[in-house]
Amino acid sequence: MVATMKAAVFVEPGRIELAEKPIPEVGPNDALIRITTTTICGTDIHILKGEYPVAQGLTVGHEPVGVIEKLGSAVTGYQEGQRVIAGAICPNFGSYAAQDGVPSQDGSYLIPSGRCGCHGYKATAGWRFGNLIDGTQAEYVLVPDAQANLAPIPDGLTDEQVLMCPDIMSTGFKGAENANIRLGDTVVVFAQGPIGLCATAGARLLGATTIIAVDGNEHRLGISRRLGADVTLDFNTCDVVAEVMRLTGGRGADAAIEALGTQTTFEQALRCLKPGGTLSSLGVYSQDLKIPLDAFAAGLGDHRINTALCPGGKERMRRLMNVIAAERLDLGVLVTHHYPLDDIVAAYDLFAHQRDGVLKVAIKPF
């Protein structure tokens, strides 16, 4: 008899449900992880709504914290029973993309428009868990290329403390890194959801001295102040672009980080920039973007627009957990709700509708 496990699977747009699936078999380069904590990401909501295409029956989720249940025969340096995390992106570091300096794009391919409803082709990038392979909202997950991707959790750190590392922290920090932040910079961060909050914290750690956080939720703006924002702007009560220009004496911000994925926030981020400034884009966009001619200075403004997918791999995860272990940052504050895996549908409903001040939901399979 085949051993089975509970898993949250994509059924159709509007439906992610709990199902029974076979526990994955372990190949030589794999590791089977018993999930102790995972979570729901904003990207999972795009999947739920049908805005991002995945295969029917795919296990969703991409933020694993757990214990090694079984190791592949070729995986060395780890032990069964060891607490580990793995990044949402699981490159093998032997690919062309990895050797070209962009391991997050390992396995990237294009989906024809007939599958996703978009024009032409849609890039998947190298995001595997809950996109190309079964993900982490389950009792077990199979980690490919485990030698390159398993990162031991330092003693003394809880699941909740490291839960943001596989995606949210890695993505938010990459947004700050892609913003080309220098000491003394002014940085505007649009949207203070979990990724935007991590971008705010990353900008502070990189040396920005004036961080302006933008959101319409006062609770989230309060957390952003705790994580490093110097100024908070509620877009419901002010003209954000005009206020940024006032705060910078008309000079404009050195960098802007867009962490929501809408035309409005993208355009405002571009309009806030100084000539020669950088727009770091983190949002997952579900519609075509338009670049306004004046904000882009007709292409003559020396602007840079950088996009990112969260870096993965054990070295990236080690560094992020070092930040947590050294008490430079506490992201446990982002975990606002806890649900058992059996109640995953209710957790999705809460998160998708952003009720009860939810930021991140810790999902416990066992």
Image (tube, rainbow, N blue to C red):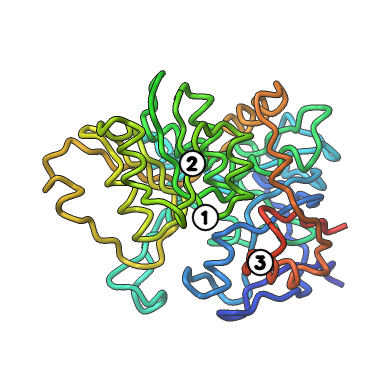
- Where residue 345 appears, as percent x and y from the top left, is 73, 72
| Quadrant housing the N terminus | bottom right
Would you say 269 lies left or right of 348 here?
left
Q: Residue at x 25, y 31 (%)?
A: 251
Q: Earlier in the sequence, mark 1 or mark 3?
A: 3
Real-space Cα separation, disc 2 to disc 1, in angstroms: 10 Å
On residue 216, the disc is 1
Dot in front, 3 or 2: 2
For the residue marked with disc 2, what is the amino acid?
Answer: Ala
Real-space Cα separation, disc 3 to disc 2, in angstroms: 34 Å
Q: Nearer the viewer, residue 364 or 274?
A: 274
On residue 213, the disc is 2
Would you say 156 lies left or right of 220 here?
right
- Vertical order, 322 against 271 (above or below): above
- The residue singled out by tag 3 in the image is 59
Q: Earlier in the sequence, mark 3 or mark 2?
A: 3
